[in-house]
Amino acid sequence: MDQTPGVHQPHPPIVVLCGSTRHWDALAEANLYETAAGRIVLAPACDLKRSHPLWNDPAKADRLKQMLDDLHRKKIDLADEVLIVNPGGYIGDSTRSEIAYACSLGKPIRYTHPVQQ
């Protein structure tokens, strides 16, 4: 690969992971495989279902959830493609919303498991 100074090299594909944090381990596994495949991975970083001082207060948790939802949409904006992490075919309401948003942007979407009908 040419490393000429001042010449912009294309970046590896960027994939954003979407899915329920109830499947946190599956999200981590998908992150591992996508990274090993040479992709830049954007993923959820907070599991609000697990106790943490940042969101132990319900009012703080509500504000943080809204901010994280907005931030995740920005990750979708940046991504070249979307990977839906859906063990057992499960897709919750938040993930459905993210899929609709990604579709509105024309982003390619992959799934880790067949989708339940």
Image: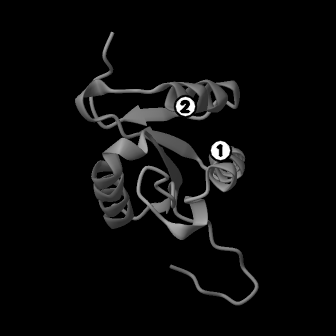
| x 55%, y 59%: residue | 56
Q: Name the residue under label 1.
A: 69
For label 2, the SS is: helix
Horizontal arrangement in the rendering, residue 22 relative to residue 46 (left or right): left
Kind of residue indicated by mark 2: Ser
Q: Of residues 48 and 75, which is closer to you in this image?
A: 48
Q: Is residue 40 above or below residue 104?
A: below
Q: Is residue 2 above or below residue 54?
A: below
Q: Of residues 90 and 75, which is closer to you in this image?
A: 90
| x 41%, y 34%: residue | 110
| x 64%, y 51%: residue | 75
Do the residues bearing badges 1 and 2 touch, measured as CB atoms within 8 Å? yes
Q: Name the residue under label 2.
A: 94
Kind of residue indicated by mark 1: Asp
Estimate the x, y position of residue 2 in percent, counting from the top left.
Answer: 57, 82
| x 40%, y 27%: residue | 91
Estimate the x, y position of residue 112 in percent, counting from the top left.
Answer: 31, 37
Mark 1, Cα crowd under 10 Å, few <14 / some 14-19 / many 20+, is some
Estimate the x, y position of residue 78 in percent, counting from the top left.
Answer: 67, 52
